[in-house]
Image: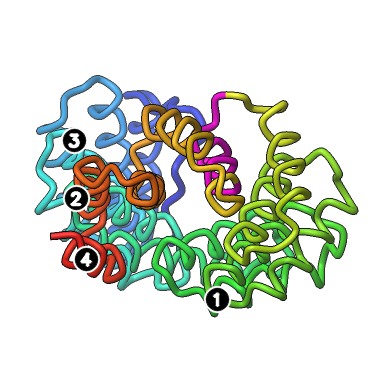
Amino acid sequence: MPFCRPAKFFAGVFALSIILTLSCYASPRDKKTVQAQAHYMMGLFYEHQEKLDEAIAEYKDALRLEKDISSIHLRLASVFIRKADTTKAIQELEEAKRLDPEGLEAGLMLALLYSTQDSSDKANKEYEEVLKRAAQKEPKNIYILKSLAALYYQQKKFENAIEMYSLILTLEKDNYEAIFLLGSLLEESGKRKEAIEKFKETLTLNPEYPDALNSLGYVYAEEGVNLAEAEELIRKALLADPDNGAYIDSLGWVYFKMSLIDKAIEYLEKASALLSDPVIFDHLGDAYFKKGISDKALRSWEKSLSLDAEQQKVKEKLEKLK
C-alpha cells in the first residue's frame, strides 16, 4: 500500500486513533500495513513539532513493519539532513532510489547533498540521472531538456549538449535562446563557421539580444575578419549591459586585432577589473607584450594560469618570455 506525503500536515491524535481502530477489524496483513501507516503519521507529527529523534524512531518503527516503502526512507533521509547526519541521509536516499528507480526525488536530494559536500562528480551524476528520467517521462518538456543540456555543457560533454539543443529546436524552431546556446557550443567545439550561422540566426529572430551580438563580434575578432562590424556589434551589446566584463573584453580584443594597442589595453584592463577570467588576463598579457611591457605581460599570463592551469598556449608564452 503506497504511503503519500500530504500537501498539508493535518495528522494528530484523533486521526491516529481512527487508523488504529480500523486496524482492529483488518486482516493480519492489512493490520501490519495500517500500523505502519500509524507510525509514519506519528513520524510526520513529531517532525512538524521539531522532535526529530522521536520522528526518526517512528519512521524506523514503520520500516520494521513495511521495509520496502520508498517514501518512508525519503522522510527518514530528510530528518537526517536536518540533523546534519549526511552519511545516514545518503544511505536512506540510496535505499529509496533502489525501491523506486523511476522516482526523481531521491536522486535530486542526493545531488543536492553531494553538491554541499563538494562532491561535484557525484552530484553531476545524480542530476544527470534525474534529468534523463524526467526527459523520458516528459520528452517534450523544454525546461527539462534545457537543464540537461546545461548540465552536459558544465560537464564539457559538448556533443551531448548539442544533441539536446538540437532536440529543443525540433520542438520550438524559433527558440532564439536555444539557437544561441547551440551556437556557443559549436564555437566551443571549434566549429566556428557553424557557430557564426547560429549567432546570425539568433539575431534575425532577436536583433537586440546582447549575448548573441557580443558572441558574433568576438568570433569575428578571433577569426580576424569583419572587425569594423565586430566593433559595432559589441558596442551595441554594451548599450544593453555597459559593465559586462565579458563584453568589454571582446571589444578590447577587437582593438587588439585592429592593432590599436593602447585602446585594447584600456578596455582589457577595465574588463580584468570587473571579471577575474583566465581569457581576459591572457588577452591583456598579449596586449602588454605587443606594447613591449614585458613585466606586465608576465604578471597577466601568470594570473591567467592561476585561474586555469591547463592552458598550454599561455604556458608556452610564459616560457618564451622568461
Spatial separation of the CA atoms under disc 4 and disc 2: 9 Å
Disc 2: which residue: 302
Q: Residue at 64% x, 27% y: name it.
A: 241
Label 1–label 4 contact, CB within 8 A? no
Spatial CA distance of label 4 from label 3 is 57 Å
The residue pinned by badge 1 equals: 190
- Give the crowd class for mark 1: few <14, some 14-19, many >=20 residues within 10 Å: few
Amino acid, disc 4:
Lys
| Disc nearer the start of the sequence (1/4) | 1
Question: Is residue 132 within the magenta segment?
Answer: no
- Viewport quadrant of the C terminus: bottom left
Considering the whole magenta stretch, tell me its main secondary structure: helix
Q: Which mark is residue 55?
A: 3
- Residue lying farthest top? 49
Q: Is residue 303 above or below residue 153?
A: above
**Mark whose residue sits in front, 1 or 4:** 4
Q: Which mark is residue 315?
A: 4
User: Which region of the structure is painted magenta?
Assistant: 243-254
Q: Which is nearer the eye, 37 or 156? A: 156
Q: Amino acid at mark 3?
A: Ala
Ranked by sequence position, the earlier of labels 1 and 2 is: 1
Q: Secondary structure at mark 2?
A: helix
Q: Earlier in the sequence, mark 4 or mark 2?
A: 2
Q: Quick check: marks 2 and 3 in contact, CB under 8 Å?
A: no
Label 4 or label 3, whichever lies nearer to me, is 4
Characterize the local packing of mark 2: few (<14), some (14-19) or many (20 or more) Cα atoms within 10 angstroms: many
Q: Circle 4: is it few (<14), some (14-19), or many (20+) Cα within 10 Å? A: some
Q: x, y percentage for residue 130?
A: 45, 64
Residue 95: x and y in percent read 24, 66
